[in-house]
Amino acid sequence: MKDDQVQYASVLDVTDWRRRVFALYGAVRAESDPATAHAVWRAGRDELLMTHPASPVEDRDAYKGPEIGAYRPELRFEVAIDTDVEPVRWEVPSATDGVIPFTRAGVLHVPTVGDLDVWWLESYGGGLFVPVKDSLAGERTYGGGRYLLDTVKGADLGGDVREGWLVVDLNFAYNPSCAYSPLWTCPLAPTGNTVAAALPVGELTRS
């Protein structure tokens, strides 16, 4: 969220939004059944996008909620983080926050999907960031790609980072805020997060 865009949300609204996102993903991780966890996430994300004053959706009165694909268990993985990578730097210009710096911290070799770079946010707060752009981008998924993990914002599906692995569940891929409004500047999936697989799961573009 843009903390300085108070015409749409006060700083207290943004704080509440973030608390709710962290709580939502905490509830997701607490569920032992992935399909049930997905249902929890879907209901929570629907409510946030459709009703919360800090939602990136501009016209919430007309918005009918995101289209989200049916849960496909074969797209959930527990994947080791391969840290034997060159620490490439990625800098994303933004309209309000200057340059947002990332460094590649590893890569996830996701079966049947492809490789996804794991990025570390170098600015205040830190966090792991994994976007994904699939072959349906621009048709059934957002053209700039979607987000899978963004731990500084609470989007964390679990795993044991001390042991070096993450839960990678493509059913939880969601649109960045810029999918809803041109007022937002978002890091979009780079080449290392673009896969040839079709992923008609998670948050989709309404047909």
Image (spheres, rainbow, N blue to C red):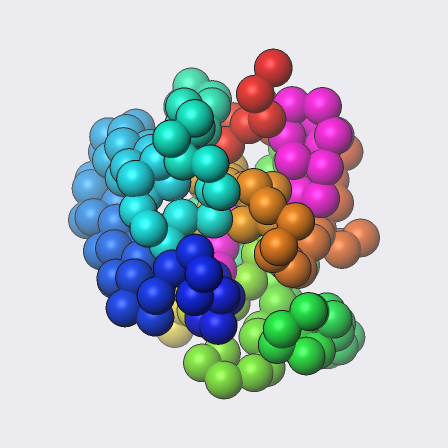
Rendered location of residue 148, percent (x, y):
51, 48
Rendered location of residue 6, percent (x, y):
43, 66
Q: Is residue 12 left or right of residue 78?
A: left
Rendered location of residue 139, percent (x, y):
72, 23
Please give the name of the residue rendered at 59% of the width and 45% of the height, measured from the top-left corner: 181
In-front residue for pair 159/5: 5
For the C terminus, the image quarter is top right
In-front residue for pair 184/191: 184
The quarter holding residue 180 reads top right
Q: Is residue 190 left or right of residue 13?
A: right
Point out the stretch of residues depicted in magenta: 132-151
Q: Is residue 168 left or right of residue 54?
A: right
Question: What secondary structure predominates along the stretch shown in magenta?
Answer: loop
The quarter holding residue 122 reads bottom right
Q: Is residue 113 visible?
A: yes
Above or below 28: residue 158: below
The quarter holding residue 121 reads bottom right
Q: Is residue 136 magenta?
A: yes
Q: Is residue 38 magenta?
A: no
